């Protein structure tokens, strides 16, 4: 497309003949400064529109100032019905302006964009008419026609010109810069009065538009978009085009990440650039553009190419410094923006509160996988450079070279002797998208996944379950020789090795298990965003939960606390409210020992509700006491004690002392066992008055469930209290609790767990101790051999099992397997199908 390169220089800006009405408009309402930064009026000279000769030469140029100026911006949330005809609402700027100025108010042009989500959000832009020129221009005449026309004419002419000023590559390419007639694919409604014309654009009415909006929300928390609104001119009398108005909206809901996250970003910068070169071309707003109304989509791409040549890309170093400075100056935190919205709208509705909690939940549980590898953490602890070859990989080993070309694994470091896991087609597993599970506690804004087994893997699982009922570790070991990456078999052998004290072999099984699981992750399973969820009750998902829990304990015992913390956070992020592995009883310990105190404070402040994924009606239900209220996770005793320590480690000693004093008053029975566990001198002159006081000496007995959690806390977290400074802090806080009658009356002793937290009474104490313990009595490997119906295995059943295993090792393939997979496997020379190649039985001879 031809572009008038001198158009910008030739256009002379003529200011409106009257004073801007924007100052008077701002007197109608007061807006929070945080929201005020989100909108502005861009330079109209950045928009190129159809020139007077466009129908002949297709030249686009800068034409004239807009007919309207942007004077106000608002956001509303609600249902479709509540967001219809916003100017009629008493809360709208239009209503307030009409009430204040009456007939002195200029004509308003209002654009309300209904953005899909839960709840729906309406971004409303108010444009005020500037004084008309004499004689009227082509654009003004076209506007009068547009104003008096019917909706069919308006839908065929109303055009949006988008430009992403700042944002990720995927956002810029998805939105594009091609003008589009939005009234045809998207439901557009017009509301008119003598004072205003309101255009109601329902983006949620179009499926593709909803996907583009969801992409913008998910891919970036900081981008800026310019929108120009035009009535399309389709003949020479209606040209040149002129903007009705333009608005710039900025989404700045992310703080600058920590310096360690920036370092990770710089490491992956080159990989991202390589991926960008392979992206698809601009799809833009082409799903909105109509062939008979806009024919310049290809020409717009040429325009972009010409502009790229003229404006060379700055150097990487300079660009990076500019980006950092820009983040420091402009980015606003999520909490500030949400608080500003709450101040504007008053009290939040249930839907709004749920939406805000869901967004905070996602930001809280984002995992930094670069810190989840225990081997790399050991290198950082002991000062070993990352470039070292810890496993002595040979450069000429083709097996190692093949592994280096596979998908990158970050949570564990694979060993050279490990064979490559099979793909899903070759008999492995994979991650697939799933629907949101039924029941409470599932975030509607998250992505849900499940583990899917191939047919070959299912056959192996059936064999494993049969071998497991023999409770013979030797048979499981032989099974792993044939299926070295079978999840349940690796977990079982890891527990057996741990039971016998062979921790190296146990660690190898756990790491190999995580290796195959991470390789099976889907590309959309991005745990760094904190919005990936899995249901442990879904078939085949439980192995992933168990493997993560075992890995967390393994790396924690090695002293790699940051790796254990990131693993625990990943495990909790899969189901934050359900927490099926009871990781909340340990994550505070790993957060404190890795000095991730801010996470712990945010976790308690989130007040995440607790949901029981394994409800029962037996002892657990009967243990609930009358008057015990349903609580959130902040009521867990370990989190209350650890919250005080988190503030103490951050230097907030006064606040920390009040928090710990309150926790000690609520759970006084924990003090003496904790002091005994850390070998403190309880008979000293300092501790004796505290322990003999009425609060701690006469503490009432608590119920069994609460006492069980207190015992787990002492077992798991006692090492944090062994430091001298922390013991001094504990003593001062206990003395502060006794010396403050207000604290004593405000924090009575807790005797029962809240109903929602009774599920944690089922947690095993051995799972939260670094001591190596024996297998639990109900472990399958300690039970007598059984058949599937529960009957014991006899000699004939064992012989049949051994024969089936020998046939499989000999290369026999089941004839009832998937036909395509069976055909591919028969190409291997050592495999053959049962019964293949045998002559059919001859019929008996006829009777004589």
Image: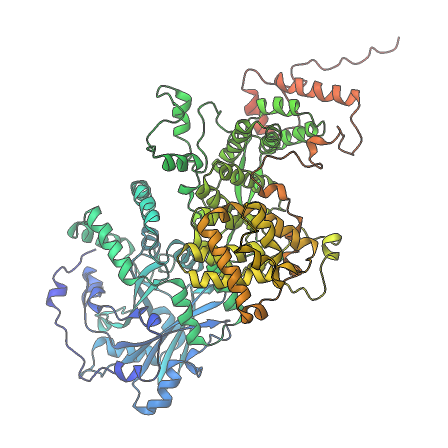
Q: Is residue 517 left or right of residue 843?
A: left
Q: Position of residue 563 (x, y in %)?
A: 45, 41
Q: Nearer the viewer, residue 415 or 823?
A: 415
Q: Position of residue 842 (x, y in %)?
A: 76, 12
Q: Position of residue 238 (x, y in %)?
A: 24, 72
Q: Residue at x 31, y 45 (%)?
A: 263
* Residue 696: quarter of image: bottom right
Name the colour scheme: rainbow
Toward the front, the furthest residue is 685
Toward the top, the furthest residue is 848
Q: Determine whether 610 is above or below 770 in the image.
A: below
The image quadrant where one finds the N terminus is bottom left
Q: Residue at x 36, y 26 (%)?
A: 389
Q: Determine whether 415 is above or below 355 in the image.
A: above
Residue 495 seen anywhere in this rendered image of the structure: yes
Q: Residue at x 65, y 14 (%)?
A: 837
Residue 530 seen anywhere in this rendered image of the structure: no
The image quadrant where one finds the C terminus is top right
Q: Is residue 252 left or right of residue 833?
A: left
Q: Is residue 24 left or right of residue 444?
A: left
Q: Determine whether 545 is above or below 483 in the image.
A: below
């Amino acid at each position: 497309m031809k572009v008038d390169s001198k158009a910008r220089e030739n256009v002379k800006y003529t200011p409106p003949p009257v004073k801007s009405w924007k100052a008077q408009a701002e007197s109608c309402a007061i807006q929070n400064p945080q929201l005020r930064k989100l909108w502005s009026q861009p330079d109209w000279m950045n928009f190129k529109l159809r020139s007077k000769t466009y129908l002949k030469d297709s030249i686009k140029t800068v034409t004239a100032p807009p007919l309207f100026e942007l004077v106000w911006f608002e956001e509303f949330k609600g249902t479709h019905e509540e967001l219809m005809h916003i100017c009629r609402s008493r809360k709208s700027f239009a209503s307030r302006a009409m009430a204040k100025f009456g007939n002195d108010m200029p004509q308003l042009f209002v654009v309300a964009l209904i953005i899909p989500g839960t709840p729906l959000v309406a971004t409303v832009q108010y444009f005020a008419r500037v004084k008309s020129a004499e004689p009227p221009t082509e654009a003004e005449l076209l506007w009068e026609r547009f104003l008096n026309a019917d909706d069919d004419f308006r839908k065929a002419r109303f055009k949006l010109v988008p430009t992403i000023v700042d944002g990720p590559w995927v956002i810029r390419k998805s939105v594009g810069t091609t003008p589009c007639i939005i009234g045809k694919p998207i439901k557009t409604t017009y509301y008119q009065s003598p004072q205003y014309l309101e255009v109601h654009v329902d983006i949620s009415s179009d499926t593709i538009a909803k996907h583009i909006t969801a992409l913008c929300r998910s891919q970036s928390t900081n981008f800026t978009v310019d929108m120009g609104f035009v009535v399309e001119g389709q003949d020479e009398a209606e040209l040149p085009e002129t903007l009705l108005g333009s608005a710039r909206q900025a989404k700045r809901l992310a703080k600058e990440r920590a310096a360690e996250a920036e370092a990770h970003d710089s490491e992956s910068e080159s990989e991202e650039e390589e991926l960008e070169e392979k992206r698809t071309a601009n799809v833009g707003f082409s799903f909105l553009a109509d062939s008979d109304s806009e024919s310049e989509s290809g020409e717009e791409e040429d325009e972009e190419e010409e502009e790229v040549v003229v404006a060379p890309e700055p150097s990487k170093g300079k660009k990076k410094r500019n980006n950092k400075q820009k983040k420091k100056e402009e980015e606003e935190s999520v909490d500030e923006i949400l608080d500003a919205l709450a101040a504007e709208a008053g009290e939040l509705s249930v839907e709004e509160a749920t939406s805000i909690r869901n967004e905070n939940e996602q930001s809280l549980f984002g995992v930094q996988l670069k810190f989840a590898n225990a081997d790399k953490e050991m290198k950082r602890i002991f000062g070993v450079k990352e470039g070292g070859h810890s496993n002595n990989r040979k450069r000429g080993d083709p097996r190692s070279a093949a592994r280096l070309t596979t998908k990158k694994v970050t949570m564990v470091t694979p060993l050279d002797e490990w064979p490559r896991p099979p793909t899903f087609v070759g008999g492995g597993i994979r991650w697939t998208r799933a629907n949101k599970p039924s029941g409470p506690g599932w975030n509607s804004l998250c992505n849900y996944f499940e583990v899917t087994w191939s047919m070959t893997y299912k056959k192996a699982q059936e064999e494993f379950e049969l071998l497991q009922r023999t409770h013979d570790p030797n048979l499981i070991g032989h099974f792993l020789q044939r299926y070295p990456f079978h999840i349940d078999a690796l977990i079982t052998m890891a527990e057996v090795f741990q039971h016998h004290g062979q921790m190296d072999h146990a660690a190898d099984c756990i790491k190999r298990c995580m290796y195959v699981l991470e390789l099976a992750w889907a590309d959309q399973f991005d745990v760094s965003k904190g919005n990936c969820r899995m249901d442990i009750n879904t078939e085949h998902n439980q192995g992933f939960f168990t493997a993560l829990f075992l890995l967390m304990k393994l790396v924690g015992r090695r002293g790699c606390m940051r790796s254990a913390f990131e693993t625990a956070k990943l495990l909790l992020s899969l189901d934050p409210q359900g927490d099926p592995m009871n990781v909340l009883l340990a994550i505070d310990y790993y957060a404190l020992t890795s000095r991730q105190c801010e996470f712990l404070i945010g976790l308690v402040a989130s007040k995440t509700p607790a949901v029981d994924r394994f409800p029962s009606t037996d002892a657990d239900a009967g243990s609930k006491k009358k008057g015990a209220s349903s609580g959130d996770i902040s009521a867990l005793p370990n989190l209350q004690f650890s919250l005080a320590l988190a503030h103490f480690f951050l230097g907030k000693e006064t606040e920390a002392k009040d928090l710990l004093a309150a926790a000690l008053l609520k759970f006084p029975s924990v003090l003496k066992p904790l002091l005994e566990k850390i070998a403190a001198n309880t008979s000293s002159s300092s501790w004796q008055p505290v322990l003999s006081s009425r609060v701690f000496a006469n503490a009432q007995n608590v119920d069994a469930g609460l006492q069980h959690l207190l015992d787990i806390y002492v077992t798991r977290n006692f090492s944090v209290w062994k430091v001298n400074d922390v013991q001094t802090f504990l003593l001062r806080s206990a003395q502060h609790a006794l010396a403050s009658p207000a604290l004593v009356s405000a924090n009575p002793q807790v005797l029962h767990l809240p109903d929602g937290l009774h599920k944690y009474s089922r947690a095993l104490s051995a799972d939260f101790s670094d001591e190596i313990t024996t297998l639990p009595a109900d472990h399958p490997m300690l039970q007598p051999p059984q058949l599937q119906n529960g009957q014991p295995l006899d000699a004939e059943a064992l012989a049949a099992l051994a024969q089936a295993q020998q046939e499989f090792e000999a290369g026999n393939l089941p004839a009832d397997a998937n036909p395509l997979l069976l055909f591919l496997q028969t190409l291997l020379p050592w495999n053959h199908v049962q019964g293949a190649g045998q002559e059919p039985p001859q019929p008996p001879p006829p009777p004589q």
